[in-house]
Image (tube, grey):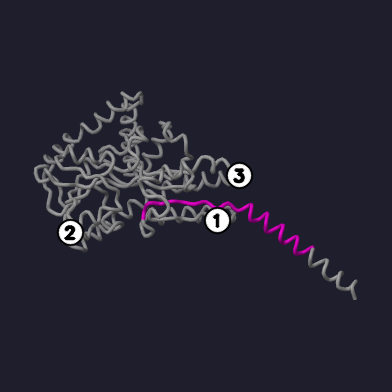
Amino acid sequence: MKKSVISVALPIFILSAFLWTWGASNAQAQTTLTYSIFFPATHAQAKAGEAWAREIEKRTAGKVRINIFAGGSLTPADQCFDGVEKGISDIGMSCFAYTRGRLPLLEALDLPMGYPSGMVATLVANDFYKKMKPRELSQVKVLYLHAHGPGLLHTQKPVNSMADLKGMKIRSTGLSAKIVEYLGGVSVAMPQGGTYEALQKGVVQGTLAPMETLKGWKQAQVIKYTTDCTSIGYTTAMFVVMNKKKWESLPKDVQKVLDEVSEEWIAVAGKAWDAADVEGYSYSAELGNKVIKLSEAEQAKWEAAVKPVADGYIKNMEMKGLPGKQAVAEVKALIKKHSKAKK
């Protein structure tokens, strides 16, 4: 009887030990990463980030799992970059402009250069990074960059000219604050997350932002007019970066997948920005908001007014020993190149 029990129990013990060992090694093989995204979960770029994460999981056959924290729930928008550097999150997506001064060379991307679309802005941002190799990004692993379509002026009263804008409080961020000031407005710096309430409560009377914010952040509900100033359209370049130590700890095959998928997602992000701009136009029109077209003479005035923004950037960078003139020339050349290709 005892022998019979042993003969039955031994194989069960061996099988259990095998399954435990296999399970432990399998658990070790799976890497779980945290991804902090400042956009709300419903935003087009949060959805694009979610799709990127799921594609990574698929192509690594479950070796990597990525937990997404949207809406700045893990790290606020202006702390996202620091959060990645310090390991609070493994991956982060936010705007370079929210850490202004820490990433100086990259500010060239946000100048009012007349970006025609989100796709062009996104391609420019990635090519600029690859060409200029900014030292300020050496402490993180850059996965990919993206950038919104032309930043336009959205207000609660009509702005047909610079004279109409004079003295108005306008929400802005990074270098777009300078644009507001040179156009005669009063810049009020804040991330997108606080803009709706600021407009609703009258803290600001307008915002400088791409069309997508009118739906993606519901701002069409608290403005009445959009002034189409595409000729001075700026962008806000954004990052998807990873903690350097975490990156270096990953197996080479996993790194390869991350690089490949990230390269593919440059186009995904660009398309998402342009589609979101179209939705922003439609949503704003449904609410009865109006689009104001500047006259050619007024466009020329706006272009002349904001020229010192780029000039000041060049001077500031050169004083710091950084190639500001080269950076501006590179951005202009890349906008021309990608605009021609997209036409």
Of the two numbered discs 2 and 1 on the same chain, state the one appearing first in sequence: 1
> SS of the residue at dot 3?
loop
Magenta-tinted stretch: 14-39
Position of 1 relative to 105 (above/below): below
> SS of the residue at dot 1?
helix
- x then y, percent, for residue 292: 15, 51
Of the two numbered discs 2 and 3 on the same chain, state the one appearing first in sequence: 3
User: What type is the residue that disc 1 sits on?
Assistant: Lys
- x then y, percent, for residue 286: 21, 63
> Is the Cβ of the residue at disc 1 closer than 8 Å to that at disc 3?
no
Q: How far apart are the two marked residues, 2 and 3, measured between alpha carbons?
A: 52 Å
Q: Does 36 sit left or right of 171 as displayed? A: right
Secondary structure mainly formed by the magenta segment:
helix
Q: How many marks?
A: 3
Q: Name the residue under label 3.
A: 251
User: What type is the residue that disc 2 sits on?
Assistant: Asn
Q: How far apart are the two marked residues, 2 and 1, measured between alpha carbons?
A: 43 Å
Quarter of the image with the C terminus is top left
Quarter of image, res 299: top left
Q: Name the residue under label 2.
A: 289
- x then y, percent, for residue 313: 27, 30
